């Protein structure tokens, strides 16, 4: 991508940024936001990690820069919708309120240029662990935090030997058969719920696994995250959906990015 030109999409979906946690890849996201604009921007939950912030305060300048960049986009006319997730569930107290030109909703419905109706939701409300064993989710979050810490140091070593970013944490997670089984069940459930709402598909986050595919003739789109995979879902002007993978650019520093790689519906 030419750095002197911004890519302009009809819509962009991002989620699971986890600002306020040490695992957040805020510098990479800031770079993405600088060179990618859209008419609609959906913040699909876990933008700020309230769970992490209650344990210890962590808020470097880069995290503040991301918030300022999003607010600046709103002021310039981007229609921004924030759908809280489980890590920033406190924002659900303000559903229906517009804050800094950003509308806070529990869910949203997006009509693409192809006239496809997409249900937009974080996804934690349909997570069995979150709903019926919340204590287990907190334990899992602590283990996941350690995995992200390990991932951070692993990539620092890679940079020292001039290798690009690669998510060790995501690789290990997807090697666990139980995790794969849970992801598959989540995808099927989300598509079923979208169908019940009369939608052509669903856009969600929550499980930190980007995906774009058809399940039972419905669109399943997960925009991924910005702690491991560094991905976003975009809609082009013609209504085509793609996953942009910011981590597969082959550079070890976000400000050296000059191309984007995408994944299309098969």
Image (cartoon, rainbow, N blue to C red):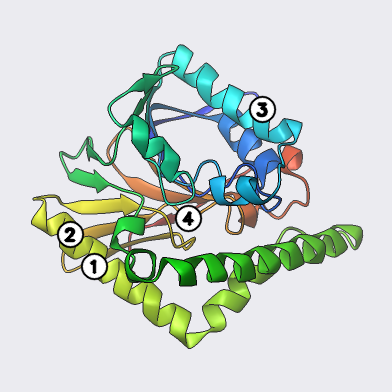
Relative to 216, say whether 218 is above or below: above
Q: Which mark is residue 17?
A: none
Q: Are marks 1 and 2 in contact (CB under 8 Å)?
A: yes
Badge 3 vs badge 2, beta-carbon distance below 8 Å: no
Q: Is residue 163 visible?
A: no
Residue at the bottom extreme of this rendering: 177
Locate residue 215 relative to residue 48 in the image: left or right.
left
**30 or 60: nearer the viewer:** 60
Q: Which residue in the structure is indicated by mark 2?
A: 193
Mark nearer the viewer, 1 or 4: 1
User: Going 38% across and 81% down the picture, which residue do you hit?
Assistant: 181
Q: Secondary structure at mark 2?
A: helix
Vertical side of 227 occupied by 90: above or below? above
How far is mark 1 from mark 3, CA to CA? 36 Å
Marks 3 and 2, Cα distance to the nearest angstrom?
Answer: 36 Å
| Residue occupied by mark 4 | 224
Q: CA distance from mark 2 to mark 4?
A: 19 Å
Assign a secondary structure to mark 1: helix
Whether residue 30 is visible to the viewer of this picture, yes or no, is yes
Q: Residues within 10 Å of mark 1 (few under 14, many from 20)?
A: some
Question: Is 19 left, or right, of 240 in this rendering?
Answer: right
Nearer the camera: disc 2 or disc 4: 2
Which residue is label 1 attached to? 189
Q: Looking at the image, which is closer to me, 14 or 6?
A: 14
**Mark with earlier residue (3, 4):** 3
Residue 145 percent coordinates (x, y): 65, 63
Q: At which x and y percent is residue 76? A: 46, 12
The image shows residue 38 at horizontal and vertical percentages of 42, 28
Query: Where, by quadrant of the figure, is residue 82 drawn?
Result: top left
- What is the number of the mark on residue 65? 3
Residues under labels 1 and 2: Cα distance? 6 Å
Which quadrant would the C terminus be assigned to in this image? bottom left
């Amino acid at each position: 991508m030419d750095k002197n030109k911004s890519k302009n999409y009809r819509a962009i979906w991002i989620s699971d940024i986890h600002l306020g946690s040490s695992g957040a890849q805020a510098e990479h996201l800031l770079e993405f936001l600088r060179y990618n604009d859209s008419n609609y921007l959906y913040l699909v939950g876990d933008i700020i990690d309230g769970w992490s912030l209650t344990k210890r305060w962590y808020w470097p300048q880069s995290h503040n820069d991301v918030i300022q960049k999003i607010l600046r986009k709103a002021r310039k006319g981007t229609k921004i919708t924030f759908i809280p997730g489980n890590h920033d569930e406190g924002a659900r107290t303000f559903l229906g309120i517009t804050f800094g030109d950003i509308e806070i909703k529990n869910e949203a419905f997006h009509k693409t240029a192809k006239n496809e109706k997409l249900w937009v939701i974080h996804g934690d409300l349909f997570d069995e662990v979150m709903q019926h064993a919340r204590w287990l989710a907190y334990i899992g979050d602590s283990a996941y935090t350690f995995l992200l810490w390990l991932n951070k140091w692993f990539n620092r070593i890679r940079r020292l030997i001039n290798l690009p970013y690669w998510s060790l944490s995501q690789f290990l997670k997807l090697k666990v058969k139980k995790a794969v089984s849970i992801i598959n069940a989540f995808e099927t459930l989300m598509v079923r719920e979208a169908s019940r709402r009369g939608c052509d598909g669903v856009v969600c986050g929550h499980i930190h696994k980007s995906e774009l595919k058809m399940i039972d003739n419905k669109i399943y789109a997960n925009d991924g995250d910005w702690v491991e995979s560094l991905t976003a879902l975009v809609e082009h002007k013609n209504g085509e959906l793609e996953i942009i993978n910011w981590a597969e650019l082959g550079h070890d520093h976000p400000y050296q990015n000059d191309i984007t790689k995408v994944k299309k519906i098969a």
